[in-house]
Amino acid sequence: MSENSLVNLMLSHQVTFPWRSMSNFQHRTEVKVTSNRVDVVYFEQLNASGIGFIAAVEAKLHDWRKAIRQAHRNKLFADRVYVAMPTQYASAAIENISVFRQASIGLILVDNERSRIYYHPPMNTQRSSKHVIKVKQTLASQNN
């Protein structure tokens, strides 16, 4: 399995984010933010040009520590930040869920049957308004 196939498998299932109606949710893959790309950005489409809640997901097959480092940079713009891993390789991440909690980064487990959020992080309070505006503009321009 590649990271790309992990992303595709996760997207084939509906990920349910807490306290959000999924009816207005969309996603984009490989979203460019500064010099990096985010594997998946889920976002709430409020109207023709407005974007609300944003969740960023970094997909990794094995290395949960590297995934946390990469996911941490997404705190610049996302309301919630997650790492997605295949369920079959996530035992070390689950054993170290306290590291995810301390970093306020969620964990999504993905298998053939479903994608489920194992740990919901709290709302991110470390966002940069400059980065939020840039990402929302990027998402809005990709919508048109």
Image (cartoon, rainbow, N blue to C red):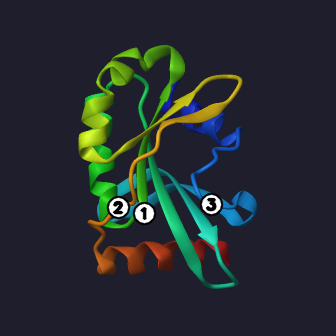
In primary-sequence order, the first of circles 2 and 3 is: 3
Residue 20, which numbered label? 3
In primary-sequence order, the first of circles 3 and 1 is: 3
User: What distance separates the C-alpha of mark 2 from that of mark 1?
Assistant: 5 Å
* Callout 2: SS: loop
In primary-sequence order, the first of circles 2 and 1 is: 1
Quadrant location, the N terminus? top right
User: What distance separates the C-alpha of mark 2 from that of mark 3?
Assistant: 15 Å
Check contact, mark 3 vs mark 1: CB within 8 A: no
- Residue 55: x and y in percent read 49, 57
Tag 1: residue type?
Asp
Residue at x 38% of width, y 53% of height: 122
- Residue 45: x and y in percent read 65, 73
Extreme-right residue of the structure: 23
Nearest to the observer: residue 91 or residue 38: 91
Residue 103 placement: quadrant: top left
Tag 3: residue type?
Arg
Query: What residue does disc 1 label?
Result: 79
Q: Is residue 14 left or right of residue 37?
A: right
Quadrant location, the C terminus? bottom right
Instruction: Note whether residue 69 is visible.
Output: no
Query: What residue does disc 2 label?
Result: 124
User: What distance separates the C-alpha of mark 3 from that of mark 1?
Assistant: 12 Å
Q: Is residue 48 above or below residue 65?
A: below
* Callout 3: SS: loop
Tag 2: residue type?
Asn
- Residue 9: x and y in percent read 64, 33
Check contact, mark 2 vs mark 1: CB within 8 A: yes
Instruction: Note whether residue 8 is visible.
Output: yes
Determine crowd level at label 1: few under 14, some 14-19, many 20+ residues with C-alpha closer than 10 A.
Answer: many
Q: Is residue 110 left or right of residue 67?
A: right
